[in-house]
Each structure stands twice: as structure tokens, then as C-alpha cells.
Image (spheres, rainbow, N blue to C red):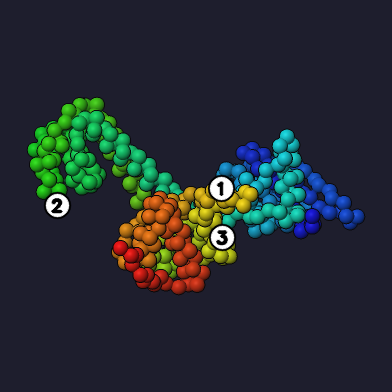
Amino acid sequence: MDIVHDRCAGLDVHKKTVVACVRHINPDGSVASVVHTFGTMTADLLALADWLDAHGVREVAMESTGVYWKPIFHILEGRFNVMLVNAGRLKQVPGRKTDVKDAEWIAQLLQHGLLSPSFIPKPEIRELRDLTRQRTELVRDRAAVANRLQKTLEDANVKLGSVASDVLGASGRAMIRAIIDGQDDPEKLADLAKQRLRGKIPELRRALLGRVTDHHRFVLRLLTDQIDALERLIERLDERIDEAMRPFDEAAGRLQGIPGVGDRAAEVIVGEIGPDVESFPTAGHLCSWAGLCPGNDQSAGKRRSGKTTKGSPWLRSLLVQSAWSASHAKNTAFSICYRRWVPRLGKKKALIAVAHKILVVIWHLLKNGADYRERQLPAPAA
């Protein structure tokens, strides 16, 4: 195989150690390698950088091991051309796996140009990505706690969720607080309903007649306090994300013009792929990275499976949510395509197809710096 890099290094990353292998070509054409093990404390990583520099290394590759690669990447970034590689593409021959052999294998693959780098955005985008992912986790935690609160109400035979569409709305919160404070009169509890929910007061009186004990009140207080704490944290994250998004307001504004993509969705998209798509040569590359492309599994001239490939779970799940919203909008290209695809693909696959279509549009908007304009399609035949 051809030699792409005369001198390069491979790093096998662990929690406490980093095994580094420098591989270089001697003047007589033979290949030589030097292996050294470093710790993962900051002083050790600085020593690793100096050691690589002393050996004249400029190309470095390492495996994306958990979060342990991040401090190494941060220290080496700027001094070397660092390539982070998907662990699935670095598998060694079975029976020959040691830390030293792994580092040598990575260096050998890098030297022959057989590695493809993972997408690592710029530092400011990485910070925004951390914030949006943390907010997503907190929103999921809030939903989980809300479900536990609903189960506690059901255990007390309080059927508030059967009447109110949002148990944690203004009316639902007022009723839950009254229940926690000891109120058990269904008429007084139902009278706390606000706005449109007041039209359901007779149903509320029946739903709020339960058997609430002190144990239920204690658990409800615990869960409501947890929900309030999570919501405060989400508000703090929202403020921080708004500050981090200011340099990217133009890109976010373009994305918000797409049906199904709101302001929070635009923040997640920018945090995942950045305000431009320079790292993705085509829309197909971006869709493949997000895990929204059909798989390619053929043998003996037959296609055995077309399920989508693995990709970014954060971007994929967000785009599927946006696809659901866009598919139910009126008179949009996405909703028309969704209705066309459902009879042939089914609802779930049709949503994935719409998410793929949205991501293709995102790539073109960010690549060309254009705004979204709705393209009218003929309505499906009745």
C-alpha cells in the first residue's frame, strides 16, 4: 500500500493512560516505530504533546473512546493535525489486541491513509452543542418526572389527566398544590380551573374525587419540587444558549423558515452541525452522518435490508420531531410528500423520509446562504 504520511502517530486512549506510537520511514525505506505510555493528567498530556513534537510528528489519530478523548484533543488541537476516528473502523484482528498493538495499528492505518476523520466542530460550536444536549437531557428528565407524578395521581384515583390535556398546566398545577396542602373537596378543587378548562367543571368534580393519603401528598410535593427545580435549570440553559447563539442568528433565522423547525430546533441544528456545512461536501454526506440514509446491504444481487444507518442520535431525533410537525402543516411540500409516502411506506418510514428531506433542505440553505421558499406541489389524487 502507498505511504501517505512519512511520520505519524496513533494514540490508544484509556481513562488513566494513553499509549502513543510514532511510526516513521527510515532513509533506507524501512519502517520504524517508537511506543511510549503517558498518563492522562494535564501535565502528562503536555508531556505527550512535547514528545510528539520532538519526534517531528504532525499527523495524529486516536480512537473516540467515551469522553476520554476530549482533554487529549483539546491539548493537541492547534499543534497537530488531530484525527478522531470512529471506534468501529479501528477493529484489530481478533486475538492480537493489546494497548501497544492498538496504538501501532492506528498509526499504521493513518500512515497508509486508511482512516476517515469524525466531524469535530469548532470550539464555540462544541460549547453550544454541550448546552443544547444538556437542555435536551433536562427536558427528558422533566418528562419522566411528570409521568411519575401522573402515576401518583392515578394511584390516588385522581383522574385529572383524563379531563385536562396538560396536568402541569396552570389549572393542573393549582389543583395539585391544593391537594398537597390538604384540600380534598372535589368542588373546591374543580373551581380552581382556569380559562377553557372551566367548561369541564362537572367532569373535573368527578375526576378529582379520589382517595389521597398523606403518603400521596408527600410524594406529590417531592415530584413537584423536582419539576420546579428542573424548569429553573432549563430556564438558565435557555438564557445561556441565547447568548451563545447570537453570532449565529443569521443561520438560525434561515432554519426557522423551514416548516416544523422552531427556534429551539434551530439551536440544536446549529449546535450539531454548525452554521455552515463545510465539513459535508454534499447533502448525502450530511444525511449519512445524521443516520437518515438508507443502508446498503446486498449479497448475490439481492438487497437484504434498507434500514437506516447509525448516526447522530441528537440530530436524528430532533429532525424526526420536526418532520412530525411539518407533516401535519397545511399546504407545504413536506406535508404533501408525507401523505404520498404513507400508503407505500407506513407512517414511521414516511416520517424518516420527511426528516431526510428536511435535512437536505437545511444543507442547501446553509451551503448557499439562502432563505427557505415554499415550493407548491400538486396535491395527491383522491
Q: Is residue 167 above or below residue 247?
A: above
Q: Which residue is mark 3?
A: 285
Q: Is residue 186 above or below residue 318?
A: above
Secondary structure type for disc 2: helix
Q: In the image, which is nearer the foreground, mark 1 or mark 3?
A: 1
N-terminal-most mark, 1 or 3: 3
Of residues 370 and 65, the one nearer the viewer is: 370
> Which residue sits at x=22%, y=46%?
165
The quarter of the picture where the C terminus appears is bottom left
Name the amino acid type tagged 1.
Answer: Arg
The residue carrying pointer 3 sits among few (fewer than 14), some (14 to 19) or many (20 or more) residues within 10 Å by Cα, namely: some
Q: Which residue is mark 2?
A: 195
Across and down, in percent, residue 144 comes to 35, 39
Name the amino acid type tagged 3.
Answer: His
Secondary structure type for disc 3: helix
Q: Using residue 215 as the reference point, say whether residue 276 is left or right of it.
A: right
> Which residue sits at x=76%, y=49%?
108
Q: Which residue is mark 1?
A: 304
N-terminal-most mark, 2 or 3: 2
Secondary structure type for disc 1: strand
